[in-house]
């Protein structure tokens, strides 16, 4: 029997306001209009963009032909001894395949959504004779993904493997990547529906092709979404998308602009990381929005002890600490959250389909890469403590210890603000950095997010510039022991990674936000010193 999908609101006051919003959404016919792709739902300013971004509402039907194509290619590859799938993609091109494959037992997918040379080198160290590279980019010009493609093409050739036969492309029709794939004769090109934005693309070729080639049951995923689709398009008080959107909207009205996501036994692995992009990039603009805070579980700091600025949301069975609980299978939850997020956009008065502030960080990084020495954008450290160099606009003024620097910096977090930890490191070898989120949340009493760079630039990066301007930003960068050249490009991966950190830091500083960058001259030793310094910070 399929798991029932539903939304529960535990707080009585919030539930009352949410119910009133549901009634208004039902009266306005929002659910049925959304299913019918009514681009007027978000006002005249959003209409042009919305008119070409609503095909995701029917993907549970329109993506069906992909299943046979994916299975045929997988069978071909396996017949050639190719059973290792590496995905080069960012944001909407990587987050959905990762949660889909992680949720299924025995399905392995190597995801490259990084410019860290160590992490890319680890992927290259796998058996290239057994490897197919899926290059996935909606625009066809994503710099990280293009770098991965160049590096793997060279590695295939050096290993005696015909690169063209081992590269599969997922992109929009007419993109530069589609044209390149045709010129190079790549193994197969899957053209996705161009009227679906990246963060709503989980059930398009962007989500299904990498996951299906790795062995995930993508037909079942579409079945799960299809089972709920009729309910989501119905104008009724029982519609779970209306209930979820109204609950989030009511919470935002009450001052809770942060949404703390914890898995409570849903059976889905990593759902919060996918939902994070959907929520942050869709709603974080024009000085408003919902900031998702992904935590390890309901016992994590910031969930049970969430303040008035945050709403604890359980992904899975109801939890005593959760204000809102959302249950359902993976396919159902994907479609539910997409509907709910689009509807929240209407409640907040913004366009949930654009991302007006994402380009700023990309432009700043490109400017640094175009300079004779991209590292010139880096300031000299104001102080060095052990294996940690201190750089920044706030918190880097003195000659104190690292703990002193952090204390001064963390004092800049405003009441009901948040701290964003941005780690431009290897999310596999430097995974211990993620432990900083909970420790900093305990120490400061504020909500703390954690993102791997540059991955978060395609996700929460929009909210950081366009959402509520109460964030404070801690960047972590690290020395690259063995850098990687990007073939036919004048920069290395390490140079690109640093340029992305510096570029984004400059844009945040230009927005008047406090930024502190800690550079680890030795990653392992520096992380250990950083953890010790955080533990010395007084608890708020």
Image (cartoon, rainbow, N blue to C red):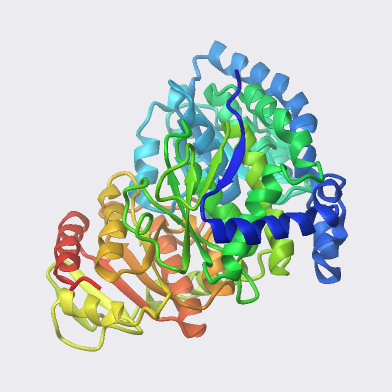
The x, y position of residue 529, in whole percent, is 14, 63
Say whether residue 441 is left or right of residue 90: left
Decide if residue 83 is in sight here. Answer: yes
Residue furthest to the bottom: 397
Q: Is residue 37 above or below residue 102?
A: below
Picture quarter with the N terminus: top right
Question: Where in the figure is residue 122, as x and y percent of width and height?
Answer: 34, 39
- Write down the quadrant of residue 436 in the picture: bottom left
Q: Is residue 373 above or below residue 260?
A: below
Q: Nearer the viewer, residue 102 or 233?
A: 233
Q: How many marks?
A: 0
Task: Report if residue 289 is visible in the image.
Answer: no
Residue at 50% from the left image edge and 30% from the top image edge: 101
Nearest to the observer: residue 393 or residue 203: 203
Residue 306's spot in the image, x, y percent? 39, 61
Q: Nearer the viewer, residue 247 or 463?
A: 247
Above or below, 109 relative to 512? above
- Residue 385: x, y in percent? 14, 73
Does residue 530 lie above or below 112 as drawn?
below
Q: Quadrant of the C terminus?
A: bottom left
Residue in the picture at 74% in, 47% down: 196
Q: Is residue 15 left or right of residue 381?
A: right
| Image position of 115 (left or right of 220) | left
């Amino acid at each position: 029997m399929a798991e029932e999908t539903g939304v529960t609101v535990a707080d009585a006051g919030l539930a009352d306001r949410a119910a009133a919003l549901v009634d208004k959404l039902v009266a306005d016919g929002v659910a049925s209009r959304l299913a019918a792709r009514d681009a007027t739902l978000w006002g005249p300013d959003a209409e042009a963009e919305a008119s070409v971004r609503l095909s995701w509402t029917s993907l549970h039907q329109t993506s069906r032909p992909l299943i046979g194509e994916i299975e045929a290619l997988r069978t071909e590859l396996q017949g050639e001894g190719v059973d290792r799938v590496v995905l080069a993609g960012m944001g909407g091109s990587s987050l959905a395949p990762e949660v889909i494959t992680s949720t299924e037992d025995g399905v392995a997918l190597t995801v490259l959504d990084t410019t860290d040379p160590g992490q890319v080198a680890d992927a290259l160290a796998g058996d290239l004779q057994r490897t197919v590279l899926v290059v996935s980019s909606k625009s066809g010009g994503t710099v990280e993904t293009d770098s991965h493609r160049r590096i793997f093409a060279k590695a295939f050739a050096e290993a005696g493997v015909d690169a063209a036969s081992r590269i599969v492309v997922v992109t929009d029709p007419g993109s530069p990547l589609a044209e390149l794939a045709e010129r190079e004769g790549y193994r197969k090109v899957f053209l996705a529906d161009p009227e679906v934005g990246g963060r709503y693309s989980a059930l398009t070729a962007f989500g299904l092709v990498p996951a299906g080639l790795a062995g995930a049951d993508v037909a079942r995923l579409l079945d799960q979404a299809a089972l709920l689709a009729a309910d989501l398009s119905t104008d009724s008080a029982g519609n779970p998308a209306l209930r979820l959107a109204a609950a989030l909207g009511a919470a935002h009205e009450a001052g809770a602009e942060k949404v703390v996501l914890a898995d409570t036994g849903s059976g889905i692995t990593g759902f919060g990381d996918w939902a994070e992009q959907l929520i942050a990039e869709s709603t974080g603009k024009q000085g408003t929005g919902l900031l998702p805070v992904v935590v390890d579980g309901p016992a994590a700091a910031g969930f049970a002890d969430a303040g008035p600025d945050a709403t604890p949301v359980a992904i899975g069975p109801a939890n005593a600490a959760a204000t809102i609980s959302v249950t359902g299978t993976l396919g159902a939850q994907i479609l539910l959250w997409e509907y709910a997020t689009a509807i929240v956009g209407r409640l907040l008065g913004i366009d949930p389909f654009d991302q007006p502030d994402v380009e700023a960080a990309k432009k700043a990084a490109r400017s640094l890469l175009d300079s004779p020495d991209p590292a010139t954008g880096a300031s000299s450290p104001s102080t060095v403590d052990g294996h940690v160099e201190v750089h920044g606009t706030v918190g880097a003024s003195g000659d104190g210890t690292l703990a002193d620097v952090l204390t001064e910096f963390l004092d800049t977090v405003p009441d009901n603000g948040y701290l964003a930890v941005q780690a431009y490191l290897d999310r596999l070898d430097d995974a211990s950095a993620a432990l900083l989120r909970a420790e900093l949340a305990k120490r400061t009493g504020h909500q703390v997010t954690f993102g791997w760079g540059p991955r978060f630039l395609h996700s929460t990066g929009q909210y950081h510039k366009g959402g509520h301007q109460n964030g404070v930003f801690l960047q972590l960068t690290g020395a690259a022991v063995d850098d990687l050249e990007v073939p036919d490009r004048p920069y290395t991966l390490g140079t690109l990674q640093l340029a992305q950190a510096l570029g984004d830091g400059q844009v945040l500083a230009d927005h008047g936000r406090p930024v502190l960058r800690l550079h680890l001259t030795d990653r392992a030793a520096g992380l250990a010193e950083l953890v010790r310094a955080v533990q010395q910070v007084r608890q708020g």
